Image (spheres, rainbow, N blue to C red):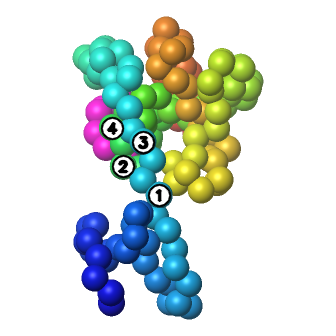
Amino acid sequence: MPAGRVVGRRRCRGSGPSHSSASGATISVVKRDTSDEGRGEYDVLVQTLVAGGSALAGRMMGMPALKAGGKLFAGYHDGSMTFKLAEPVRSRALEIPGAHLFDPSGMGRPMREWVQVPAAASERWGELAEAALAYVREG
């Protein structure tokens, strides 16, 4: 393999990480920008839900997360919170400016029940977390 830098277990060439697939095609690995915006608000919400006994904090899908009964219902990702929501709450959440379906891979494969809500709308995070918690408890 040509000289390059090692990122994790992959040897990379050029300006961005890449590797060859089994077919020999080069696959680029894109590192998205990350943001800590809203992290303080997320931490306060976690403390409230954990202290109330309704949730446990942990990590899942590579992000800080909230679980209830072993089921993931919310998380913090790149300056936003993500929520697993049922209809009609999901549709209303998607109306929040900057909100969109959560695509953890960043490869155009959003998760249909998950909405990512930016820190600019952090005043809505508490109500959405409660709705997500109720949803996973029902199912």
Residue on which the image places disc 1: 30
Q: x and y percent of residue 86 in the render?
A: 66, 31
For image coordinates 35% across by 15% down, the residue present is: 41
Q: Residues within 10 Å of mark 1 (few under 14, many from 20)?
A: few
Looking at the rendered structure, which numbered label has been put on residue 64? 4
Q: Quadrant of residue 42?
A: top left
Foreground: disc 3 or disc 2: 3
27 and 128: which is toward the camera: 27
First to last magenta residue range? 54-60
Q: Give how far apart the Cα atoms at labels 3 and 1 are.
A: 10 Å
Q: Amino acid at mark 1?
A: Val
Depth check, mark 1 against mark 4: the one in front is: 1
Q: Amino acid at mark 3?
A: Asp
Separation (CA) of disc 3 from disc 4: 17 Å
Disc 2: which residue: 62
Comes first in the chain, label 3 or label 4: 3
Which label sits in the foreground, 2 or 1?
1
Question: Percent position (x, y) of residue 85?
Answer: 61, 31
Mark 2 or mark 1: name the one nearer the start of the chain: 1
